[in-house]
Image (tube, rainbow, N blue to C red):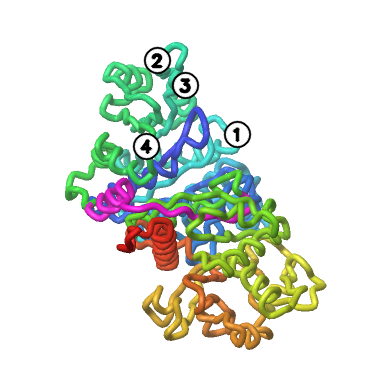
């Protein structure tokens, strides 16, 4: 049977529970244990699929088509394993399950209550992955902050599991904040004390306290926290701010987080952590040999979490190319034909991001045209690919009114149209084309050189697709459909062979990029951007070409 680690948070949100959970999981995995992580979110939405990106950041899609919290992206990137629908549970899904059971008569006419019916369902979900036999340790991150009304059922479920399971099978790690008051020039432990006291009042006693802090914790401060929070001093872990999230596992190893957790769980047989690949990645990330400026054309740029997986994919691709990727945010709403040269000047590559709705669409189309006409490496994802198709139709095929029926239902040239199976769909939640689908790649294409295999599998999240009625026109004019779904003929990849690097994909490649396996399209895009930057530099400085001046 698996052992369980519960990660809770106090004082404030956004402390980094997901990164601490992923870092601990990485260390345990590196010691030879089979580990997975799950996230329990206290909001009543069944999943984050219908949430505005401004509200909750990106929606991460798993292999099996679950729309989940963005923290699952961190889990996959750190552990290099796939998560599933079982790895993300919300209050909405819990209540939906219990209510459905009540309607079916599963409770034999009893009054359905938060305790025991809701908490029993939470406990069942918490132990689901552990009972599969696939894992030694299951880490459960509890969303929200201790003391929130919506988090109470989850905390109560943890309390019950602490009582029901053997003592060494349930460990609680509490993440909290030690604020630094600049006026007083000292760190304050009182918020942490109150947070732990509140957790204890709800019946859950933390075994380990991880302290987010700007300054180093002195031994005296650690002793004070341990004394007032009733834990051993060795169980007070410093989590100082790090330049990159990928340094956190090494910082936690230095602090001994994994060892104290293993000790609490009674696990004495384990190897030294194997983190050679991780350290090699970090070295390349910290000491790049070059730099490229990549324009991120989007409309949710005010909240960087809206494009979290894309940004992390650039980190992975930059490291493997030994190149620092500098992201330049360009809001698509403010791009026009008149200012596009000014807006995109100095870029070495252009990525047009995914999204929904008509806002900012014309700016994306103008940006694509600039990249196509100026030989600027271009990469379009989902809606970004569709914008490349529309731009080509308008400016190369001469279909001036070409558009997507998402933005213009009455367009006479719907080069992007609603998928056939989506036309009868009315409910919004969980009804898009979701999850991993196969894609056959055309031999001899750029996509074939990028992936190196004839068939791939990538994750999707969309309703609209390339309209195959126009495919022959596009290919005759020079735009190649280099990847298609083998069952439906859906165009998955488009490219311009005459361009240095011009690729659009209908799927979301960023969802499968990890530290150990950077996504190939991102890797080759950054490589192309690097070559573009070098050519610009050579043009500026003829001496680099060996010329006499």
Disc 2 target residue: 186
The mark nearer the N terminus, 1 or 2, is 1
Q: Residues within 10 Å of mark 3 (few under 14, many from 20)?
A: some
Residue toward you, 241 or 368: 368
Q: Residues within 10 Å of mark 1 (few under 14, many from 20)?
A: few
Asked if the residues shown at circle 4 and circle 3 are in contact, with their CB atoms under 8 angstroms apart, the answer is: no
Residue 248 percent across, percent down from the top left: 34, 41
The mark nearer the N terminus, 4 or 1, is 1
Q: Which residue is drawn at 35% across and 39% down?
A: 171
Q: Which residue is drawn at 37% across and 43% down?
A: 5
Q: Is residue 98 visible?
A: no
Q: Does the magenta stretch include residue 293?
A: yes
Asked if the residues shown at circle 4 and circle 1 are in contact, with their CB atoms under 8 angstroms apart, the answer is: no
Disc 3 target residue: 191
Q: Which residue is drawn at 77% across and 73% down?
A: 401
Q: Is residue 256 above or below residue 231?
A: below
The mark nearer the N terminus, 3 or 2, is 2
Q: Comparing marks 3 and 2, which lies closer to the viewer?
A: 2
Which residues fall within the magenta stretch?
276-300
Q: Residue at x 51, y 78 (%)?
A: 498
The mark found on residue 149 in the picture is 1
The mark nearer the N terminus, 1 or 3, is 1
Q: Is residue 351 above or below residue 119?
A: below
**Secondary structure type for disc 3:** helix
């Amino acid at each position: 049977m698996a052992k369980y680690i519960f990660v809770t948070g106090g004082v404030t949100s956004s402390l980094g529970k997901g990164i601490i959970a992923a870092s601990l999981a990485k260390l345990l995995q590196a010691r030879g244990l089979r580990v997975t992580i799950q996230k329990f979110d206290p909001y009543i939405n069944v999943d984050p699929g219908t949430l505005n990106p401004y509200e909750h950041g990106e929606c991460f899609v798993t292999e099996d088509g679950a729309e989940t919290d963005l923290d699952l992206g961190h889990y996959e990137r750190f552990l290099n394993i796939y998560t599933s629908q079982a790895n993300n549970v919300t209050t909405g899904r819990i209540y939906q399950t219990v209510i459905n059971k009540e309607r079916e008569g599963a409770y034999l006419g009893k009054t359905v209550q938060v305790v025991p019916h809701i908490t029993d369902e939470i406990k069942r979900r918490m132990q689901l992955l552990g009972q599969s036999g696939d894992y030694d340790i299951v880490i459960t991150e509890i969303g929200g902050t201790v003391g929130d009304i919506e988090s109470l059922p989850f905390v109560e479920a943890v309390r019950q599991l602490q009582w029901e399971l053997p003592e060494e099978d349930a460990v609680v790690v509490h993440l909290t904040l030690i604020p630094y008051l600049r006026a007083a020039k000292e760190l304050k432990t009182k918020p942490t004390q109150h947070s732990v006291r509140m957790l204890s009042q709800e019946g859950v006693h933390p075994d380990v306290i991880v302290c987010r802090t700007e300054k180093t914790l002195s031994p005296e401060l650690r002793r004070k926290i341990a004394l007032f929070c009733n834990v051993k001093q060795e169980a007070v872990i410093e989590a100082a701010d790090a330049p990159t999230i990928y340094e956190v596992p090494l910082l936690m190893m230095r602090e001994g987080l994994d060892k104290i957790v293993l000790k609490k769980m009674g696990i004495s047989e384990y190897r030294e952590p194997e983190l050679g690949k991780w350290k090699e990645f970090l070295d390349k990330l910290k000491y790049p040999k070059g730099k490229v400026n990549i324009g991120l054309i989007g409309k949710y740029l005010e909240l960087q979490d809206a494009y979290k997986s894309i940004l992390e994919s650039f980190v992975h691709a930059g490291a493997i190319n030994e190149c620092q990727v500098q992201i330049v945010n360009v809001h698509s709403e403010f791009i026009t034909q008149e200012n596009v040269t000014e807006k995109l000047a100095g870029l070495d590559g252009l990525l047009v991001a995914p999204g929904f709705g008509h806002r900012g669409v014309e700016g994306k189309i103008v940006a694509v045209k600039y990249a196509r006409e100026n030989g600027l490496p271009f990469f379009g994802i989902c809606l970004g690919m569709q914008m490349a198709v529309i731009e080509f139709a308008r400016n190369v095929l001469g279909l001036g009114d070409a558009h997507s029926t998402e933005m213009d239902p009455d367009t006479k040239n719907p080069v992007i149209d609603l998928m056939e199976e989506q036309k009868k769909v009315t409910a919004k939640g969980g009804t898009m084309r979701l999850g991993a689908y196969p894609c056959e790649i055309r031999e001899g294409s750029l996509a074939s050189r990028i992936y190196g295999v004839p068939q791939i599998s990538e994750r999707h999240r969309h309703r609209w697709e390339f309209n195959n009625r126009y495919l022959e026109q596009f290919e005759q004019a020079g735009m190649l459909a280099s990847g298609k779904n083998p069952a439906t003929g859906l165009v998955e990849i488009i490219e311009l062979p005459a361009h240095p690097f011009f690729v659009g994909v209908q799927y979301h490649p960023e969802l499968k990029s990890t530290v150990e396996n950077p996504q190939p399209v991102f890797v080759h895009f950054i490589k192309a951007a690097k070559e573009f930057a070098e050519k610009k530099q050579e043009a500026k400085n003829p001496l680099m070409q060996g010329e006499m001046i």
